[in-house]
Image (cartoon, rainbow, N blue to C red):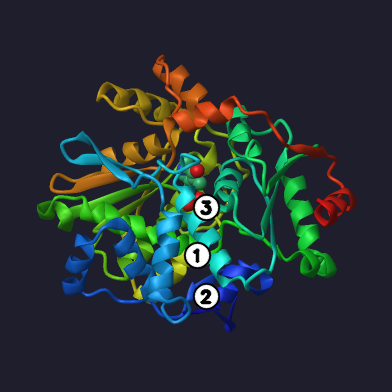
Amino acid sequence: MKLYNLKNHNEKVNFATAVKLGLGQKQGLFFPVELPVIKPIELSEILKMDFITRSTEILSKFIYNEISKEKLYKHVKKAFSFKHPLKIKITKNISCFELFHGPTLAFKDFGARFMAQMILSLNKENESVTILTATSGDTGAAVAHAFYKMKNVRVIILYPKGKISELQEKLFCTLGKNIKTISINGSFDDCQKLVKEAFNDKKLKESIGLNSANSINISRLLAQICYYFEAFSLIPKEKRNNLVIAVPCGNFGNLTAGLLAKSIGLPIKSFIACTNANDTVPRFLNEGKWDPKQTISTISNAMDISQPNNWPRIEELFNRKKWNLKELRFGSVSDNITKTTLQEIFKLGYVSEPHAAIAYRLLKDQLKEDEFGLFLGTAHPAKFKDTVEKILQNKILLPDELKYRINSPLLSYNINPDFNILKKFLIKE
Ligand SMILES: *Cc1c(COP(=O)(O)O)cnc(C)c1O
């Protein structure tokens, strides 16, 4: 698989290099030179396969010349070794597609776990790697669990002390073994700055084999394409021509993956790009002006992003396919409407959470008579327990995995935002 840098089309790399680098020169995103094609006859065969076999087929179309199908199958099986997505009926023509049955209860497990498998597979035998990453909550947990107990891999996660929820902290700071977590006396930006400093230190980078595992890695997007095929396979045949999928968006990785699925032959009729009050993209689609504002804190905090870093990939895809951006449906939802929507869904007999509720709202409001709608359930309601309990006036049960983690002791180190202290840690620990 060849990929080019969106900021410099002359920089071309293979899949292995794109996974290792994450970003190209000038922080440019990598994008596939060629997009595979799945013809309708092949599609009907693919849709009949089980999730792991089908996902291997799809991923193999991108990376067959770098990883054999047999080998890929083993990695996919390990990456997706948790309960597969479920389709839950909400109304006559709307269902939730739950992607949160992985170890950290959010859809990010798909991308993070497949990326971990790819880093493992592309690494030379006995070469040791250090994954260093900063998190403001969810990504860190997904990355930690994805690499947990992997041989020759050490994971170091920085997070701002006191600025993530107790539940989030417990989820990844209680693992131990090859997962080291450091709370930083500072902000998320301080954490990111430390990570950048480490990557700029060439000698350090080489001596400990630094890798970033960040969220714009192409391997994550490829992994996420797979569950859109699963969603499609679960829809009754007579409704498949009229499928609309509503995606709760933050960095727009999830939506990019959905559009990629469509671009290679999955006939999804339409997508709805759903945001909270951080509505840079809805405003852009409405007015044609890219005008990011200060990021606002909302109850759907995983979507509190005003400069979504996957957007250039979406524009590139529309250009390449000669699609019109006018066909992309969109909308933004305030916290107040999110709350009343959560209550509305609850009355229908389903407990949701703020991110999915935003997608439900826009889907419900925009779905046409003859269409069938899916909204993506991106996180388990227990992850946002306090918010959801307050809005619904109802107790949320924690899944067993979380109950166990809540009662485990925190194992984090704590340091000041000082690169020299971090450097010593990276060399010694
Ligand atoms: C990360 C996240 C999102 C946003 O996904 P993107 O791929 O960044 O657009 C939405 N909901 C939840 C719960 C998330 O954790």
Place of residue 220 in the rendered image (x, y in percent of width and height, measured from the top left): 49, 60
Residue at 48% from the left image edge and 79% from the top image edge: 66
The answer to whether residue 270 of the structure is visible from this angle is yes
What residue is disc 1 on?
219
Place of residue 149 in the rendered image (x, y in percent of width and height, measured from the top left): 60, 50
Given the image, on which type of amino acid does mark 2 rest? Phe
Q: Is residue 405 left or right of residue 209?
A: left
In this view, which residue lies farthest toward the left?
238
Disc 2 residue crowd, few under 14, some 14–19, many 20+, Cα 10 Å: many
- Compared with 393, 145 (above or below) is below
Given the image, on which type of amino acid does mark 3 rest? Asn
Q: Are marks 2 and 1 in contact (CB under 8 Å)?
A: yes
Instruction: Please name which of the two marks, 2 or 3, marks the residue nearer to the observer.
Output: 2
Observer-nearest of 105 and 50: 50
Say whether disc 1 or disc 3 marks the residue closer to the N-terminus.
Answer: 1
- Image mark count: 3
- Compared with 239, 63 (above or below) is below
What residue is disc 3 on?
251
Instruction: Please name which of the two marks, 1 or 3, marks the residue nearer to the observer.
Output: 1
The answer to whether residue 325 of the structure is visible from this angle is no
Q: Helix, strand, or loop for circle 1?
A: helix
Is the residue marked 3 within 8 Å of ligand 1, measured from its CB?
yes
Observer-nearest of 394 and 347: 394
Q: Distance between the residues labelled 1 and 3?
A: 16 Å
Say whether disc 2 or disc 3 marks the residue closer to the N-terminus.
Answer: 2
Q: Helix, strand, or loop for circle 3?
A: loop
